């Protein structure tokens, strides 16, 4: 009888593990919770892509709601979402600050020349350290930051027309009112 019970312990452990793994199959990988939501965005000062001798600091955005978009010229999904940023920039609803992530200035400048530049300003992060501060998993990633410099939303992966119209813009408008 005791030998039979010993065989049931590994079986029970396997069943519990299988349940957790199966549950994970139905989770949306784009909804990875960020520990930074509701916390102050990392304060930074970085060189501008267009003028490397000039610095841009996140403190310059205090008092404004803004979008912080992490992108790279080598990123295929960034190319997919880029027309949405161009359209949003033309509507002048909210400033969009770009962070060129682990890229070269030449490649980034060519990419923007080919596809358009929707960004109010672009900072460079060639070594990925600022990306680490923001908890970037990969590119593209997009953050909405409120007037006090607090991260209110994080989008992992390319922004879609649906997420822009149903999540991002309503939140931006709400934050602009307060």
Image (cartoon, rainbow, N blue to C red):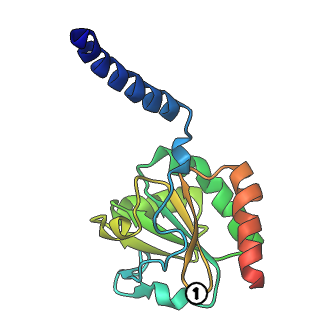
Image height of 169 relative to 57, above or below: above
Give the residue displayed 77% in from the left and 66% down from the top. 170
Give the number of marks: 1
Image height of 89 relative to 138, above or below: below
Q: Position of residue 83 (x, y in %)?
A: 65, 54
Q: Position of residue 154 (x, y in %)?
A: 55, 62
Image height of 60 relative to 151, above or below: below
Q: Quadrant of the C terminus?
A: bottom right
Instruction: Determine if residue 96 is in view.
Output: yes
Give the residue displayed 68% in from the left and 69% down from the top. 89
Element class at badge 1: loop
Q: Position of residue 48 (x, y in %)?
A: 41, 79
Name of the residue lying farthest toward the left: 3
Q: Nearer the viewer, residue 49 or 95?
A: 95
Image height of 153 relative to 74, above or below: below
Q: Quadrant of the N terminus?
A: top left
Give the residue displayed 62% in from the left and 80% down from the top. 146
Q: Which residue is mark 1?
A: 148
Q: Nearer the viewer, residue 23 or 48?
A: 23
Q: Nearer the viewer, residue 100 or 168?
A: 168
Q: Position of residue 26 (x, y in %)?
A: 56, 33
Instruction: Determine if residue 92 is in view.
Output: no
Give the residue displayed 58% in from the left and 87% down from the top. 148
Say whether residue 45 is left or right of residue 70. left
Say whether residue 69 is left or right of residue 18. right
User: What crowding class fits label 1: few (fewer than 14 Cα within 10 Å), some (14-19), or many (20 or more)?
Assistant: some
On the image, which quarter does residue 97 sit in?
A: bottom right
């Amino acid at each position: 009888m005791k030998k039979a019970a010993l065989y049931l312990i590994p079986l029970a452990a396997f069943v519990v593990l299988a349940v957790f793994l199966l549950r994970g199959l139905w989770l949306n990988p784009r909804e990875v919770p960020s520990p930074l939501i509701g916390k102050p965005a990392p304060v930074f000062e970085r060189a501008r892509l267009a003028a490397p001798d000039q610095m841009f600091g996140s403190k310059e955005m205090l008092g404004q709601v803004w979008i912080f978009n992490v992108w790279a010229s080598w990123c295929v999904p960034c190319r997919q979402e880029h027309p949405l940023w161009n359209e949003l920039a033309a509507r002048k609803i909210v400033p969009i600050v770009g962070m060129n992530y682990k890229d070269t200035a030449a490649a980034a400048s060519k990419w923007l020349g080919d596809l358009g530049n929707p960004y109010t300003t672009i900072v460079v992060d060639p070594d990925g350290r600022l990306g680490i501060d923001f908890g970037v998993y990969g590119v593209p990633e997009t953050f909405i930051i409120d007037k006090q410099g607090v991260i209110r939303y994080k989008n992992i992966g390319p922004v879609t027309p649906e997420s822009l119209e149903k999540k991002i813009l309503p939140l931006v408008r709400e934050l602009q009112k307060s």
